[in-house]
Amino acid sequence: MIFKKLNRAAKLALSIVFLLPTPCFSQIRVVGITDGDTLTVYDQIANVQKKIRISAIDSPEKKQAFGQDAKKTLSDLCFDKTVEIKYIDTDRYGRTVADVACGGIDAGAYMVGKGMAWVYDKYSSGHEFLYPIQQQAKAATLGLWGYRPDLPAVAPWEWRKLKNKQTTPITE
C-alpha cells in the first residue's frame, strides 16, 4: 500500500488535511451514529474520531417521535462504511457540518427522501434541491409524514424549543 511507503512526516501532512476545514473530499469510515443527522467517523491515517453533522437537514431527536427510526435509517445507510465528507462549516458544538455521501448516496437527500428528516430551513442555503425531495416524501406520507395522520409532525427545532420551555424554571 502506498501509505506504508510514506515516511512519518508525509503521513502526518496527509493526516492534517482531515483536520483542516477544506472543500475537498476525504474518505473515512463511519464508526457511530448519534441520531438521524449526526455520525462519528474515524480517520485511520490521522488516528482521530470526529463528529459530523449532515448539512441542511434536521432529523427528529432521539426522544422525539420517529427519532429512533431516523437513527436506524442513517445507520443502515452509513454505519461501518467508507464515506465521502465535504466540509461546509463547524457548528457551535464543534462538530463538522458537511455533505456526506455513503456508498455514493447523498445522506441528506436520502434521509429527507425517506421521510426521516426535514430540510433545515435556517441552514438550507445551497441545498435547495432538497425541498422537492421533501415534498415528494410528504405527498407519499413516508416516514414521519405518515406517523400520525391526525397530528402534524413537529420539526426538531420546534420540538427543542418546546422541550426547553418545559424544563426552564419560571422566575418572577
Image (cartoon, rainbow, N blue to C red):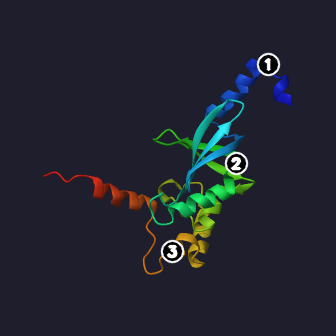
State the image coordinates of residue 113 (x, y, percent, origin top left). 63, 67
Q: CA distance from mark 1 to mark 2?
A: 28 Å
| Residue at (81% x, 22% y) in the render | 6
| Residue at (57% x, 71% y) in the render | 143
**Direction from residue 71 to residue 110 in the image, left or right:** right
Residue type at numbered disc 1: Asn
Snapshot quadrant of residue 31:
top right
State the image coordinates of residue 140 (x, y, percent, origin top left). 60, 78
Q: Depth check: 89 or 167 in front?
A: 167
Snapshot quadrant of residue 69:
bottom right
| Residue at (71% x, 24% y) in the render | 13
- Marks 1/2 in contact by CB < 8 Å: the verdict is no
Numbered circle sitting on residue 7: 1
Q: Earlier in the sequence, mark 1 or mark 2?
A: 1
Residue labelled with disc 3: 147
Crowd band around label 2 with a 10 angstrom C-alpha radius: few (<14), some (14–19), many (20+): some
Q: CA distance from mark 3 to mark 1?
A: 55 Å
Residue labelled with disc 2: 80
- Marks 3/1 in contact by CB < 8 Å: the verdict is no
Residue type at numbered disc 2: Asp
Secondary element at tag 3: loop
| Residue at (58% x, 78% y) in the render | 139
Compared with 29, 12 (above or below) is above
Q: Of the residues tagged 3 and 1, which is closer to the observer?
A: 3
Compared with 137, 55 (above or below) is above
